[in-house]
Image (spheres, rainbow, N blue to C red):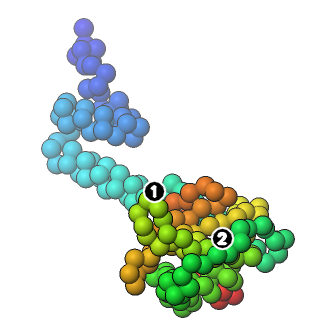
Amino acid sequence: MSSESNVKWHQRPFVVIILLLLVLPLGLYFMWKNGLWSKATRWVVTAICVVIAFVNVANNYGSSEEEPTVENTEEVEEVEVEESNSINPELDAIIKEGYFTACETYTVETLVNSFFTNPEWESFISPEDGKYHLNATGGILYEDKPAVAAIQFEIEGDSWEMNAFEIDGEPQTDLMSVALIKKMCSSVEE
Protein backbone atom coordinates (compact mmCIF):
# COMPACT_ATOMS: atom_id res chain seq x y z
CA MET A 1 0.00 0.00 0.00
CA SER A 2 1.45 3.35 -0.94
CA SER A 3 1.48 6.38 1.33
CA GLU A 4 -0.46 8.27 -1.38
CA SER A 5 -3.57 6.21 -0.70
CA ASN A 6 -3.47 7.08 3.03
CA VAL A 7 -3.69 10.82 2.33
CA LYS A 8 -7.18 12.19 2.89
CA TRP A 9 -8.81 14.31 0.20
CA HIS A 10 -8.35 17.57 2.13
CA GLN A 11 -4.64 16.90 2.63
CA ARG A 12 -3.83 16.93 -1.08
CA PRO A 13 -2.22 20.18 -2.30
CA PHE A 14 -4.26 20.16 -5.53
CA VAL A 15 -7.54 19.98 -3.59
CA VAL A 16 -6.47 22.77 -1.22
CA ILE A 17 -5.54 25.00 -4.18
CA ILE A 18 -8.97 24.37 -5.74
CA LEU A 19 -10.63 25.19 -2.40
CA LEU A 20 -8.58 28.39 -2.13
CA LEU A 21 -9.90 29.43 -5.52
CA LEU A 22 -13.52 28.36 -5.07
CA VAL A 23 -14.26 28.32 -1.32
CA LEU A 24 -11.68 30.64 0.20
CA PRO A 25 -12.38 30.11 3.93
CA LEU A 26 -12.36 26.33 3.58
CA GLY A 27 -9.18 26.43 1.50
CA LEU A 28 -7.42 28.60 4.09
CA TYR A 29 -8.58 26.33 6.89
CA PHE A 30 -7.25 23.15 5.27
CA MET A 31 -4.02 24.87 4.18
CA TRP A 32 -3.26 25.84 7.80
CA LYS A 33 -4.64 22.64 9.38
CA ASN A 34 -2.62 20.29 7.19
CA GLY A 35 0.58 22.38 7.09
CA LEU A 36 1.02 21.64 3.39
CA TRP A 37 3.58 24.37 2.77
CA SER A 38 6.07 26.28 4.87
CA LYS A 39 4.72 28.78 7.37
CA ALA A 40 6.06 31.70 5.31
CA THR A 41 4.27 30.40 2.19
CA ARG A 42 1.03 29.98 4.14
CA TRP A 43 1.27 33.58 5.43
CA VAL A 44 1.89 34.92 1.92
CA VAL A 45 -1.07 32.94 0.52
CA THR A 46 -3.27 34.15 3.40
CA ALA A 47 -2.21 37.78 2.87
CA ILE A 48 -2.93 37.57 -0.87
CA CYS A 49 -6.36 36.07 -0.19
CA VAL A 50 -7.20 38.78 2.35
CA VAL A 51 -6.13 41.56 -0.06
CA ILE A 52 -8.19 40.02 -2.88
CA ALA A 53 -11.21 39.70 -0.56
CA PHE A 54 -10.94 43.35 0.56
CA VAL A 55 -10.55 44.60 -3.01
CA ASN A 56 -13.59 42.56 -4.04
CA VAL A 57 -15.69 43.93 -1.18
CA ALA A 58 -14.53 47.50 -1.86
CA ASN A 59 -15.39 47.21 -5.56
CA ASN A 60 -18.85 45.84 -4.78
CA TYR A 61 -19.65 48.23 -1.92
CA GLY A 62 -22.60 50.39 -2.82
CA SER A 63 -22.96 48.94 -6.30
CA SER A 64 -25.83 46.62 -5.38
CA GLU A 65 -28.21 49.37 -6.48
CA GLU A 66 -27.77 50.96 -9.86
CA GLU A 67 -28.01 54.72 -10.04
CA PRO A 68 -31.67 55.46 -10.53
CA THR A 69 -32.99 57.04 -13.69
CA VAL A 70 -35.03 60.02 -12.62
CA GLU A 71 -35.54 62.67 -15.28
CA ASN A 72 -37.38 65.94 -15.55
CA THR A 73 -40.48 65.98 -17.67
CA GLU A 74 -39.91 68.73 -20.20
CA GLU A 75 -41.02 66.42 -23.02
CA VAL A 76 -43.83 64.67 -21.13
CA GLU A 77 -47.46 65.65 -21.01
CA GLU A 78 -48.65 67.13 -17.77
CA VAL A 79 -49.32 64.83 -14.81
CA GLU A 80 -52.24 65.49 -12.47
CA VAL A 81 -51.29 66.52 -8.94
CA GLU A 82 -53.20 67.78 -5.92
CA GLU A 83 -54.01 71.46 -5.46
CA SER A 84 -51.47 73.46 -3.47
CA ASN A 85 -52.26 74.70 0.00
CA SER A 86 -50.08 76.63 2.43
CA ILE A 87 -50.93 77.20 6.06
CA ASN A 88 -47.86 79.31 6.84
CA PRO A 89 -46.06 81.00 3.92
CA GLU A 90 -43.27 82.24 6.22
CA LEU A 91 -42.35 78.69 7.26
CA ASP A 92 -42.68 77.52 3.66
CA ALA A 93 -40.16 80.21 2.67
CA ILE A 94 -37.57 78.84 5.10
CA ILE A 95 -37.54 75.62 3.09
CA LYS A 96 -38.17 77.04 -0.39
CA GLU A 97 -35.39 79.62 -0.01
CA GLY A 98 -33.02 77.05 1.50
CA TYR A 99 -30.35 74.97 -0.24
CA PHE A 100 -29.55 71.28 -0.36
CA THR A 101 -26.01 70.43 0.72
CA ALA A 102 -25.61 68.48 -2.53
CA CYS A 103 -26.62 71.55 -4.58
CA GLU A 104 -25.84 74.86 -2.93
CA THR A 105 -26.18 76.81 -6.19
CA TYR A 106 -29.98 76.82 -6.45
CA THR A 107 -32.76 77.16 -3.91
CA VAL A 108 -35.06 74.23 -3.16
CA GLU A 109 -37.92 76.11 -4.83
CA THR A 110 -35.91 76.70 -8.02
CA LEU A 111 -34.92 73.04 -8.20
CA VAL A 112 -38.43 71.70 -7.64
CA ASN A 113 -40.20 74.23 -9.87
CA SER A 114 -37.78 73.70 -12.76
CA PHE A 115 -37.62 69.89 -12.50
CA PHE A 116 -41.20 68.85 -11.71
CA THR A 117 -44.03 69.24 -14.18
CA ASN A 118 -46.91 71.14 -12.55
CA PRO A 119 -45.16 71.50 -9.19
CA GLU A 120 -47.52 71.94 -6.26
CA TRP A 121 -46.67 72.84 -2.67
CA GLU A 122 -48.76 71.84 0.34
CA SER A 123 -48.04 72.39 4.01
CA PHE A 124 -49.53 70.84 7.12
CA ILE A 125 -48.85 70.13 10.75
CA SER A 126 -48.50 66.44 11.50
CA PRO A 127 -51.00 65.19 14.09
CA GLU A 128 -48.49 62.50 15.17
CA ASP A 129 -45.55 64.71 16.13
CA GLY A 130 -46.89 68.26 15.81
CA LYS A 131 -44.12 69.20 13.33
CA TYR A 132 -44.60 71.45 10.33
CA HIS A 133 -44.27 69.69 6.96
CA LEU A 134 -44.11 70.98 3.40
CA ASN A 135 -44.78 68.63 0.50
CA ALA A 136 -43.71 69.31 -3.07
CA THR A 137 -45.35 67.13 -5.72
CA GLY A 138 -45.14 67.06 -9.48
CA GLY A 139 -44.54 65.02 -12.56
CA ILE A 140 -41.22 63.40 -13.46
CA LEU A 141 -39.96 60.68 -15.73
CA TYR A 142 -39.02 57.56 -13.79
CA GLU A 143 -37.50 54.71 -15.75
CA ASP A 144 -38.67 56.48 -18.93
CA LYS A 145 -42.33 56.57 -17.78
CA PRO A 146 -44.37 59.49 -16.42
CA ALA A 147 -44.72 59.35 -12.64
CA VAL A 148 -45.74 61.56 -9.73
CA ALA A 149 -42.95 62.43 -7.32
CA ALA A 150 -43.45 63.75 -3.80
CA ILE A 151 -40.79 65.26 -1.56
CA GLN A 152 -41.65 65.92 2.06
CA PHE A 153 -39.72 68.45 4.08
CA GLU A 154 -39.88 68.72 7.86
CA ILE A 155 -39.18 71.98 9.64
CA GLU A 156 -38.24 72.55 13.23
CA GLY A 157 -37.34 76.07 14.30
CA ASP A 158 -35.17 77.64 11.59
CA SER A 159 -33.80 74.32 10.29
CA TRP A 160 -35.34 71.84 7.90
CA GLU A 161 -34.58 68.48 6.35
CA MET A 162 -35.84 66.32 3.53
CA ASN A 163 -38.04 63.87 5.40
CA ALA A 164 -39.24 61.58 2.60
CA PHE A 165 -39.21 61.01 -1.14
CA GLU A 166 -41.82 58.94 -2.97
CA ILE A 167 -42.47 58.01 -6.57
CA ASP A 168 -46.07 57.05 -7.34
CA GLY A 169 -46.67 56.62 -3.62
CA GLU A 170 -43.71 54.23 -3.12
CA PRO A 171 -41.12 55.34 -0.54
CA GLN A 172 -37.63 55.72 -2.01
CA THR A 173 -34.21 55.07 -0.47
CA ASP A 174 -31.70 57.69 0.63
CA LEU A 175 -29.69 56.79 -2.49
CA MET A 176 -32.68 57.74 -4.63
CA SER A 177 -33.14 61.01 -2.70
CA VAL A 178 -29.52 61.99 -3.31
CA ALA A 179 -29.80 60.97 -6.98
CA LEU A 180 -32.91 63.14 -7.34
CA ILE A 181 -31.22 66.18 -5.82
CA LYS A 182 -28.17 65.76 -8.07
CA LYS A 183 -30.36 65.29 -11.14
CA MET A 184 -32.47 68.35 -10.28
CA CYS A 185 -29.31 70.41 -9.82
CA SER A 186 -27.71 69.28 -13.07
CA SER A 187 -30.92 69.82 -15.04
CA VAL A 188 -31.11 73.47 -13.94
CA GLU A 189 -27.51 73.95 -15.08
CA GLU A 190 -28.25 72.55 -18.57
Q: Residue at x 64, y 61 (%)?
A: 167
Q: Is residue 80 left or right of residue 132?
A: right
Amino acid of disc 2: Thr
Q: Position of residue 12 (x, y in %)?
A: 29, 27
Q: Which mark is residue 146?
A: none
Which of the pair 59/6 is nearer the observer? 59
Let me know if residue 43 appears in the view: yes
Q: Is residue 13 left or right of residue 90?
A: left
Amino acid of disc 1: Asn
The alpha-carbon separation of the residues under discs 1 and 2 comes to 34 Å
Q: Is residue 48 left or right of residue 185?
A: left
**Label 2 belongs to which residue?**
137
Q: Residue at x 18, y 32 (%)?
A: 33
Q: Which mark is residue 60?
A: 1
Q: Residue at x 72, y 63 (%)?
A: 147
Q: Secondary structure at mark 2?
A: strand
